[in-house]
């Protein structure tokens, strides 16, 4: 079974995915894969520098993520260029990792943690879609505090994604992460039980 876990920036996907992993889910993390496919020496990084210029690299040859982020968030044309380079590579690598997990354990629940699951169309490839939801003002506050961003910078990132309230339409399960972590864990346990029941056809 493939379960898609999505939300918005700083809505709590990583926090929730850790809870699912503790219960037995096998994680495939799109943000992590997106880093892997643009490591030094990859074709992905070569294409990025061909399109955005060599000044998006740090002195050590790694991608300067802060600099590229400042150039793309809030500029849809630039963001589209970045997505066109990175997303096909992320999808291919995620499919490969998923295959490897399911070959080793056909009964595994593979959790795809993908911020852009809905925007990127991957929602059609999962068996169930789980949304980590918070009200926008909580999302803004947590993003500003976690990343040290101004309200304006944080809103540019939030506005690069589909609003969380719209994402609810696509979700089979919604986890409200606006309360304390214990409350979130209780909801995760309920969804996990539902996934296990679904898997056994109960
Ligand atoms: C622009 C980059 C270099 C900024 O790096 P940075 O380290 O600051 O952020 P990080 O990668 O950890 O992403 C943080 C969050 O930003 C949001 N985000 C990232 N990329 C995008 C995007 N293309 N569109 C909308 N939101 C995005 C996601 O919610 C993500 O969880 C980086 O985000 C990137 O390469 N993005 C393109 C790849 C992508 O779409 N990743 C998202 C999952 S596939
Ligand atoms: N229930 C909660 N109560 C208080 N703080 C929380 C809660 N859930 C998450 N946080 C905090 O909010 C921030 C965002 O959470 P997290 O990193 O899990 O989000 P995310 O959706 O994975 O973000 P991104 O995809 O943007 O990296 C973190 O600093 C995290 O510690």
Image: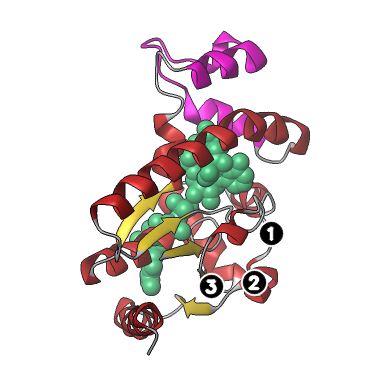
Disc 3 CB within 8 Å of nearest ligand 2 atom: yes
Query: Is the C terminus in the top left, top right, bottom left or bottom right quadrant?
Result: bottom left
Residue at 36% x, 60% y: name it: 110
For residue 102, side relative to residue 173 (left or right): left
Q: What is the number of the mark on residue 170?
A: 2
SS category of the residue bearing label 2 = helix
Tag nearer the camera, 1 or 3? 1
Q: Nearer the viewer, residue 39 or 144?
A: 39
For residue 103, side relative to residue 68 (left or right): left
SS category of the residue bearing label 3 = loop
6 drawn magenta: no
| Residue on which the image places disc 3 | 134
Quarter location, residue 97:
top left
Query: Is the N terminus in the top left, top right, bottom left or bottom right quadrant?
Result: bottom left
Q: Pick whichever of labels 2 and 1 is earlier in the sequence.
A: 1
Is residue 149 at least partly visible in the picture? no
Q: Position of residue 74 (x, y in %)?
A: 71, 41
| Residue on which the image places disc 1 | 162
Q: Residue furthest right?
A: 77
Number of other residues with Cα within 10 Å of mark 1, as a class: few under 14, some 14 to 19, many 20 or more: some
Above or below, 106 against 39 in this view is below
Residue at 62% x, 60% y: name it: 124
Above or below, 186 against 154 in this view is below
For residue 72, side relative to residue 21 (left or right): right
What are the residue bounds of the magenta stretch?
43-72
Quarter location, residue 7:
bottom right
């Amino acid at each position: 079974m493939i379960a898609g876990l999505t939300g918005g920036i700083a809505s709590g996907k990583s926090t929730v995915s850790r809870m699912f992993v503790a219960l037995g889910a096998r994680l495939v993390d799109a943000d992590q894969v997106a880093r892997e496919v643009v490591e030094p020496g990859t074709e992905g990084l070569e294409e990025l520098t061909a399109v955005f210029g060599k000044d998006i690299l740090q002195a050590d040859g790694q991608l300067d993520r802060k600099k590229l982020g400042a150039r793309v968030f809030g500029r849809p044309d630039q963001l589209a260029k970045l997505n066109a380079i990175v997303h096909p590579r992320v999808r291919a690598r995620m499919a490969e990792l998923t295959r490897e997990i399911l070959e080793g354990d056909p009964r595994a629940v593979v959790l795809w943690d993908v911020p852009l699951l809905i925007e990127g169309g991957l929602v059609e490839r999962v068996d169930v879609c789980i949304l980590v939801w918070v009200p926008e003002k909580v999302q803004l506050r947590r993003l500003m505090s976690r990343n040290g961003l101004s309200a304006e910078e944080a809103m540019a990132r939030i506005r690069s994604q589909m609003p969380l309230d719209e994402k609810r339409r696509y979700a089979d399960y919604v986890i409200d992460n606006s309360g304390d972590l214990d409350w979130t864990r209780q909801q995760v346990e309920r969804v996990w039980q539902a996934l296990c029941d679904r898997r056994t056809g109960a």
